[in-house]
Image: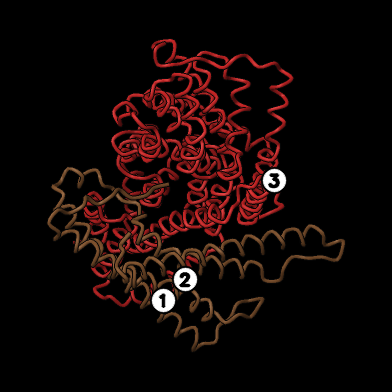
Chain colours: A red, B brown
């Protein structure tokens, strides 16, 4: 078997192991090490690589931004920021039809601006918004669907852990990627609100009572009250953009900022601190094991020359660029029904990115990378809310007593449609993702 | 939680490592923030902390290594349970035991090669660029967590093997995601 064939065959094997429930990072690591042996006919290369690979991966300065963003999100969930965001959003949106659900989306978007993780956003906002939704008579389906979808705004609106990983894999500039994600992230929130508006008009029995209309003076007062969120957001994102800080420094400042807020409001008790650290520990270790496994796997794939062969194949065949792109996005949507977003990115980007980079979409190479990154980010995030395996669905469903998983599946459908519509628009008009970057840089 | 003395001990070890690692992460945050503030006030005679990047790298290395045992003990790994959920409970319990054995092998492999890297760095006296911290010290700090990871991995094999051969096995849980 040639090396390229070995590389090719490693994918069914890898997917087989993963679908037999082997932890994804472990599966990548084992396939990488064994594949390396099959190519070099010796264990020595792997033995020597792992003398330094664990060290260099775990002590990477660019990856250090990941645990810091996770810590920032954990601290942000303490100290009642989520409640204030919800109140502010409810004052502006709550009196409309389906307004409580819209307010939940607005609050998720606000929380997403200081949290880089989807599950943390869903869980934190779920605690605040689910009781409000149920109190106002919203159906379990719409309530849980709203929050599961709203949770993805944690990743779609920068800062975003997934974008950081994508930037490292593709050697793109994180600041530019964050800026490119900004408008699509806001569009996502608007799209979800439109989805709610349409759903409650088609099926009025799903929605409950709206809030009473709030005077504008009060609305602005509530909007001003969330200034710490805005301050941290602009400090973190603006600081990276203006070159004041490295992304790691920005994440540390964000973590310190959310910790100060939590402390000032009495939310940072000893047990809450321990919980935050343990939660951060779990997510961080999960992510870094996958990254380590992916490093071993990519080492083997590079050795097999599969990425180059794949690029040559696609160039030679002269496929329609748009067909290739759409096929990839559909592939992500399907795979996302079963796999988590980070594993998908680490598994596919080292192969896909070189391929699409050689295709001409009429964009400058740097801009193309940003646009592709945003598209991939969105389609892998859809995976968090698509049945049968969508982590956000599980998290929110487990928080809402009396709602079956089937009801949650049906409740999230309008939001999935909204995601697909948005993706289509962003594919057709790259300028939506790129104009802010072009204007700012 | 496993209430046997060994179960408690492993739980305690993993929790302690995770919290210590978390403390390192908080320290990394503090060092970075202080350094940024110092850099902003250079005109006032302050400055960035010398070698702050090196401190961050060492701190994150220690933290991640110390987090691994907790994640494994709590079954926090990302995995796909959709297919095995359709299997009979005993079959998926057996699979979990099998993968826990693979994880033990991987943990041993990682720790062994890490140790070998430590020995190399100890021998060649390599140190960081600015603070001149010997690299082997950073390796040694990471090795503590990896050693506990190995202990936890061994414990998890026993735990899942016991479950798999139990009269009524418990269905393995779904894993994490981001």
Q: Nearer the viewer, mark 2 or mark 3?
A: 3
What is the C-alpha distance between the residues marked 2 and 3? Answer: 31 Å
Which residue position is annotated with label 2?
A55
- Secondary structure at numbered mark 1: helix
Residue displayed at 56% across by 28% down: A106
- Secondary structure at numbered mark 3: helix
Which of the 4 image quarters holds residue B149?
bottom left
What is the C-alpha distance between the residues marked 1 and 2? Answer: 7 Å
Crowdedness near tag 3: few (<14), some (14–19) or many (≥20) residues, C-alpha within 10 Å: many
Crowdedness near tag 2: few (<14), some (14–19) or many (≥20) residues, C-alpha within 10 Å: many
- Secondary structure at numbered mark 2: helix
Which residue position is annotated with label 1?
B114
Disc on res. A235? 3
Q: Position of residue A351 (x, y in %)?
A: 37, 50
Crowdedness near tag 1: few (<14), some (14–19) or many (≥20) residues, C-alpha within 10 Å: many
Which of the 4 image quarters holds residue A212?
top right
Q: Are marks 1 and 2 in contact (CB under 8 Å)?
A: yes
Q: Position of residue B2 (x, y in %)?
A: 30, 62
Residue displayed at 53% across by 55% down: A271
């Amino acid at each position: 078997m040639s090396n390229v064939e070995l590389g090719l065959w490693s994918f069914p094997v890898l997917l087989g192991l993963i679908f037999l429930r082997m932890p994804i990072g472990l599966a990548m690591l084992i396939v990488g090490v064994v594949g390396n042996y099959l190519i070099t006919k010796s264990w020595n290369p792997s033995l020597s690589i792992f003398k330094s690979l664990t060290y260099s991966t775990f002590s990477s300065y660019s990856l250090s931004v990941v645990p810091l963003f996770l810590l920032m999100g954990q601290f942000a969930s303490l100290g009642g920021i989520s409640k204030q965001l919800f109140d502010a959003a409810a004052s502006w949106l709550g009196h409309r039809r389906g307004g409580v659900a819209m307010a939940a989306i607005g609050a998720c978007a606000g929380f997403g601006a200081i949290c880089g993780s989807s599950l943390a956003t869903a869980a934190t906002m779920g605690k605040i918004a689910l009781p409000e939704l149920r109190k106002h008579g919203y159906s379990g389906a719409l309530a849980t669907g709203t929050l599961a979808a709203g949770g993805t705004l944690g990743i779609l609106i920068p800062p975003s852990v997934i974008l950081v990983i994508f930037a490292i894999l593709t050697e793109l500039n994180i600041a530019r990627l964050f800026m490119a994600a900004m408008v699509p992230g806001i569009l996502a929130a608007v799209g979800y609100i439109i989805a709610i508006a349409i759903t409650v008009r088609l099926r009025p029995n799903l929605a409950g009572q709206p809030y009473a209309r709030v005077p504008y003076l009060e609305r602005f007062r509530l909007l001003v009250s969330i200034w710490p969120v805005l301050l941290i957001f602009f400090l973190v994102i603006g600081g990276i953009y203006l070159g004041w800080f490295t992304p790691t420094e920005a994440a540390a400042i964000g973590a310190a900022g959310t910790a100060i807020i939590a402390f000032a409001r009495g939310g940072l008790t000893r047990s809450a601190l321990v919980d935050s650290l343990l939660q951060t520990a779990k997510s961080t270790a999960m992510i870094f094991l996958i990254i380590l496994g992916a490093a071993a796997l990519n080492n083997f794939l590079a050795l097999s020359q599969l990425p180059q062969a794949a690029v040559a194949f696609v160039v030679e065949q002269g496929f329609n660029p748009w067909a290739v792109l759409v096929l990839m996005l559909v592939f992500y949507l399907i795979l996302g029904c079963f796999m988590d977003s980070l594993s998908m990115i680490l598994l596919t980007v080292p192969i896909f990115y070189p391929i699409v980079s050689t295709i001409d979409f009429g964009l400058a190479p740097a801009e193309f990378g940003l646009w592709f990154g945003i598209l991939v980010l969105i389609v892998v995030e859809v995976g968090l809310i698509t049945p049968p395996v969508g982590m956000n669905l599980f998290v929110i469903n487990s928080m809402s007593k009396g709602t079956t998983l089937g009801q949650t599946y049906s409740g999230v459908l309008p939001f999935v449609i909204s995601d697909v519509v948005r993706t289509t628009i962003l594919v057709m008009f790259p300028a939506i993702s790129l104009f802010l970057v072009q204007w700012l840089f | 939680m496993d209430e046997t003395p060994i179960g408690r001990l492993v739980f305690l070890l993993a929790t302690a490592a995770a919290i210590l690692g978390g403390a390192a992460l908080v320290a990394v945050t503090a060092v970075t923030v202080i350094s940024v503030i110092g850099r902003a006030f250079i005109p006032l005679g302050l400055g960035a902390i010398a070698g702050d990047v090196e401190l961050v790298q060492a701190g994150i290395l220690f933290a991640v290594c110390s987090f691994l045992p907790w994640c494994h003990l709590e079954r926090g790994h990302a995995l796909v349970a959709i297919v095995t959920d359709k299997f009979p409970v005993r079959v998926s319990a057996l699979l979990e035991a099998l993968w826990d054995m693979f994880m033990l092998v991987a943990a041993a492999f990682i720790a062994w090669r890490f140790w070998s890297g430590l020995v190399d760095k100890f021998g060649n006296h390599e140190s960081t660029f600015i603070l001149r911290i010997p690299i082997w010290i950073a390796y040694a700090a990471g090795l503590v967590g990896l050693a506990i990871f190995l202990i936890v991995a061994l414990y998890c094999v026993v735990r899942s093997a016991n479950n798999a051969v139990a009269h009524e096995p418990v269905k393995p849980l779904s894993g994490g995601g981001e």
